[in-house]
Amino acid sequence: MQEQQFTNIYGGAISLQCRSYDAASCREFSVCTQKLSLRGLTACTCAVWLAAYALFAYTENSAVLSAAIFVTLIGLLFYLHFVKIDQESLLVIASLGIQMTSYYASGKESTTFIEMNNVKDVVINEAIYMQKVIYYLCILLKDPVDPHGISEVVPVFQSSKPRLDCLVEVYKRCQEVFDHSKTSL
């Protein structure tokens, strides 16, 4: 296993872990982001509770404090279970397909599998995002009607948003797996 340090499009630190299984026919790429910051979580909680206390002092209604605690807890659970992704992985198996998995801060996993006979290629694409040009890795799916066409573009590493240098590393190793599968046929 190799681990390299990169940054995302916001300048935050991310790490890329590359694992090879069975020579060049199977590779796994994991992009890990920073864990949840206790300092930021505490600051947000304090801000909500201070605003609730100020509202309580103005209205003298204790339901305001109870509602603030309830909203904070529900909001935190929602954030951890549906928004905060700690790790994204891409598993490329030449004979089977591509599996993308997202690991949330709450422990929840979300997995998508694409069969290799549906995959046309893996490419690095560019997009305009917040007045900047960013690059992202995507999987091109074959069009069942037109053999030279593309039916869908599936982006990879949507949450971590790695920069181009990290994407190039993943792209090169994915192409090695595709080349290995073409030569073994």
Image (cartoon, rainbow, N blue to C red):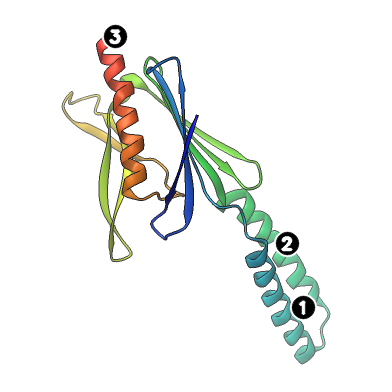
Q: Nearer the viewer, mark 1 or mark 3?
A: 3
Q: Is residue 114 left or right of residue 120?
A: right
Q: Nearer the viewer, mark 2 or mark 1?
A: 2
Q: Which mark is residue 163?
A: none
Q: Is residue 165 left or right of residue 47?
A: left
Residue at the location (81% across, 83% down)?
Answer: 61
| Disc 2 to disc 1: CB gap under 8 Å | no
Identify the element where label 3 is drawn: helix
Residue at the location (45% across, 14% down)?
Answer: 22
| Amino acid carrying mark 2 in the image | Leu
The residue lying toward the viewer, choosing from 50 and 184, is 184
| Amino acid carrying mark 3 in the image | Ser
Disc 3 versus disc 2: distance between alpha carbons?
Answer: 54 Å
Q: Is residue 79 left or right of residue 3?
A: right
Question: Which residue in the structure is indicated by mark 3?
Answer: 184
Q: Position of residue 110 (x, y in %)?
A: 54, 37
Q: Relative to 138, is 164 above or below?
A: below
Disc 2 versus disc 1: distance between alpha carbons?
Answer: 14 Å
Disc 1 versus disc 3: distance between alpha carbons?
Answer: 67 Å
Q: Position of residue 24 (x, y in %)?
A: 37, 18
Q: Which mark is residue 73?
A: 2
Position of the C terminus, as image quadrant, is: top left
Q: Relative to 66, is 160 above or below?
A: above
Q: Relative to 97, is 105 above or below?
A: below
Q: Position of residue 176 (x, y in %)?
A: 30, 24
| Amino acid carrying mark 1 in the image | Val
Q: Which mark is residue 64?
A: 1
Residue 150 in which image quadrant: top left
Residue at the location (31% across, 15% down)?
Answer: 181
